[in-house]
Amino acid sequence: MREKALVLRKVNDEAELEVLRGSACGSCKGCPESSKKKRLIVWAKDTIGVESGQLVEIEMEAKGVISATFIMYLFPLIVFLLGVAGGYEFAPLLNIKLKEPFALLTGIIGLAISYLFIYLNNRRFEKSQIYKSKIVNIIDKFSK
């Protein structure tokens, strides 16, 4: 996945970038960032020697994007559905008459646990190189 970004500053072998939203991202209402038109600031590995003010192209490996998507969306959904199914099946064993509300409650508890797991492992995910963007091309060679 490639995006254009503006180099804000450089620290050692990493650069702080402001991602320039593409046309697809600009019209999407999927995240609060796009709807408020806030700046999206990221850090990327600089292997080509950029300077502040340059327009660059950054890339994240496809497996990193897919893995992050799974972790943030599919994993919680799967845990939620397993919680609902488990609650529905175990309600009679626990002598609970209202199976559906109990199943919903166990699904929500599973969802909360999945997000807690993601939160507690966030530092490990951040350190993994698979989720790290890297600068692959300088679009504008003139710095400000």
Image (cartoon, rainbow, N blue to C red):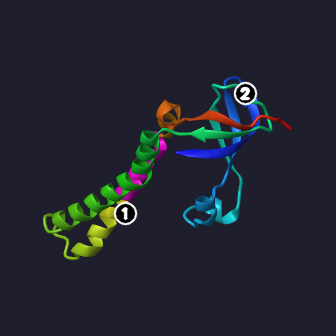
**Looking at the image, which is closer to me, 16 or 110?**
16
Residue 17 placement (x, y as % from top left): 70, 41
Q: Which residues are magenta?
A: 110-121
Q: Position of residue 10 (x, y in %)?
A: 74, 30
Q: Is residue 96 above or below residue 110?
A: below
**Marks 1 & 2, CB-CB < 8 Å contact:** no
Residue where numbered disc 1 is placed: 108
Q: Which residue: 46% across, 45% down? A: 65
Query: In this figure, which residue is indicated by the disc labeled 2?
Result: 11
Label 1 vs label 2: CA separation?
42 Å
Q: Is residue 52 above or below residue 77?
A: above
The image quadrant of residue 105 is bottom left
Compared with 17, 50 (above or below) is above
Of helix, strand and loop, which one carries label 1?
Answer: helix
- What label does residue 8 carry, if any? none
Q: Taking 119 as reference, is 137 above or below it?
A: above
- The image position of residue 129, as x and y in percent, is 50, 30
- Position of the C terminus, as image quadrant, is top right
Q: Secondary structure at mark 2?
A: strand
Amino acid type for the residue under numbered disc 2: Val
Q: Is residue 77 magenta?
A: no
Q: Main secondary structure of the magenta part?
A: helix
Q: Residues within 10 Å of mark 2 (few under 14, many from 20)?
A: few
Compared across the picture, whether 90 is left or right of 132 comes to: left
Q: Residue at x 33, y 60 (%)?
A: 80
**Measuring 41% from the left and 44% from the top, which residue is drawn there?**
67
Q: The residue under label 1 is which amino acid type?
A: Ile
